């Protein structure tokens, strides 16, 4: 599904040479004047502030052995990972996608700061990652050497009050990464029944007090802003528990954001689709930030390990998952950021990294 896909002239009309190389046009050639202004407005807000890319050194290094070709950054954000990978690997072209126009606008500005050679190897497209295959096909790209998924939201998305993601800033409830599609947090908070809200809080954030919070939300309607919601949630949580584990509304905000953006629903197919494009020796790396997300990633990557479509004819009666040739293998990497990074960047502390490499096809 490619809802929210916006044609970005910068690279969507990219010519691709006969050997499959991206021929990226300079930013200034395609985005100028009124078009550029409209493009900025489509983003609603310019990306500002900083986002420290999680496990940057590890991510950059794990792509060192992959074949030259195209790397997809499926969650471009502030392009921290993308530009570091680009600089380290001269043989890679990096295509970043993001469902948030703010990230694409930021990518255009970033591209303008790169040297000509690096800029020519970098492009950005507004799309959801479950539409990545279509977005890449539109660019004439059928194969990938690598892919990165750095899930969730970026720091600037949380920090810009108007986006309505954070209990720290007073703003209308929104939380949509793509402001041109879907229902906002306001609808979830004010229109879903208590049972559905309870399920969302349990499934998306393992919230212990899901039922109490859901009932409090329904009783307090209408709830218009982030701070009103935070106050309702805080009051619904027993006083003794409020003092531990960060802000009492943190889990509720995370759960509602995941629901608004259908984050867990679209993840499995997106991973499978992108993995289907990766060439032998190519790698996929996924950073997940909470247990529900990591469970899905682990399951999809584990399912991919054995290619049960090619059973081993030498032992035809054994279970295919035990005998089929390996299609993917785990790459051993640090699963979590080091202590220094966790201390410096609180966002990194919940990160879990999983990496797989596509095996060479057996003769
Ligand atoms: C954690 S940030 C990525 C940060 C990035 N790695 C960097 O170094 O700046 C996640 C980004 O992914 C985007 N995103 C989340 N879900 C997405 C989806 N389904 N499709 C496309 N982009 C998505 C968000 O809008 C956000 O910009």
Image (cartoon, helix red, strand yellow):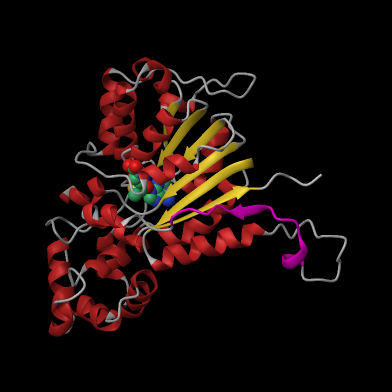
Q: Is residue 207 above or below residue 109?
A: below
Query: Residue at left 29%, top 57%?
Result: 339
Residue 235 lies in quadrant: bottom left
Relative side of 359 to 271, left or right: right
Relative to 359, is 15 on the left or the right?
left
Residue 193 lies in what quarter of the image? bottom left
Q: Which image quarter holds the C terminus?
A: top right
Residue displayed at 55% across by 38% down: 65
149 on left or right of 34 = right
Depth check, front residue: 46 or 44: 46
Residue drawn at (81%, 71%), measured in percent from left and top? 318
Visible residue check, residue 48: yes
Determine which quarter of the picture holds residue 306.
Answer: bottom right
Q: Is residue 328 magenta?
A: yes
Looking at the picture, how far across and down is residue 272, in whole percent?
58, 53
Q: Name the one closer to the observer, 359 or 61.
A: 61
Which range of residues does the magenta coloring cover?
320-334
Visible residue check, residue 75: no
- Marker count (numbered): 0
Asked if residue 238 lies left or right of residue 143, the reply is left
Q: Position of residue 37 (x, y in %)?
A: 25, 26
In percent of width and height, residue 11 lies at: 45, 26
Coordinates of residue 323 in the picture (x, y in percent): 77, 64
**Residue 309 counted in the magenta span:** no
């Amino acid at each position: 599904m490619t809802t929210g896909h916006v044609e970005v002239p910068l690279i969507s009309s990219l010519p691709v040479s006969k050997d499959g190389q991206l021929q990226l046009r300079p930013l200034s050639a395609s985005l100028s004047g009124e078009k550029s202004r409209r493009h900025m407005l489509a983003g609603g807000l310019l990306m500002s502030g900083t986002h420290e890319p999680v496990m940057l050194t590890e991510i950059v290094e794990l792509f060192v052995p992959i074949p030259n070709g195209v790397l997809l950054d499926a969650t471009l954000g502030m392009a921290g990972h993308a530009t570091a990978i680009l600089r380290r690997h001269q043989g890679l072209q990096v295509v970043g996608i993001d469902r948030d126009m703010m990230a694409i606008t930021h990518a255009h500005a970033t591209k303008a700061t790169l040297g000509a050679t690096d800029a020519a190897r970098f492009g950005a497209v507004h799309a959801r990652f479950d539409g990545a295959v279509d977005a890449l096909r539109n660019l004439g790209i059928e194969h990938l050497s690598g892919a990165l998924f750095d899930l969730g939201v970026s720091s600037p998305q949380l920090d810009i009050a108007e986006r309505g993601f954070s209990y720290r800033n007073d703003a209308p409830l929104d939380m949509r990464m793509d402001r041109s599609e879907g229902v906002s947090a306001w609808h979830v908070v004010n229109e879903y029944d208590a049972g559905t809200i309870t399920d969302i809080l349990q499934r998306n954030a393992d919230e212990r007090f899901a039922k109490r919070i859901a009932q409090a939300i329904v009783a307090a309607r209408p709830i218009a802003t982030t701070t009103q919601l935070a106050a309702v949630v805080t009051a619904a949580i027993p006083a003794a528990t409020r003092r531990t584990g960060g802000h009492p509304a943190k889990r509720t905000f995370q759960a509602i954001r995941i629901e608004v953006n259908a984050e867990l629903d679209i993840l499995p197919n997106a991973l499978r689709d992108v993995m289907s494009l990766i060439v032998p020796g190519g790698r996929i790396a996924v950073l997940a930030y909470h247990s529900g997300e990591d469970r899905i990633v682990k399951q999809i990557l584990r399912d991919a390990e054995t290619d049960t479509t090619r059973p081993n004819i030498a032992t035809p009666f054994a279970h295919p998952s035990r005998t089929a040739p390996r299609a993917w293998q785990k790459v051993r990497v640090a699963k979590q950021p080091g202590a220094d990074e966790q201390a410096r960047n609180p966002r990194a502390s919940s990160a879990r990294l999983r990496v797989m490499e596509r095996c060479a096809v057996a003769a």
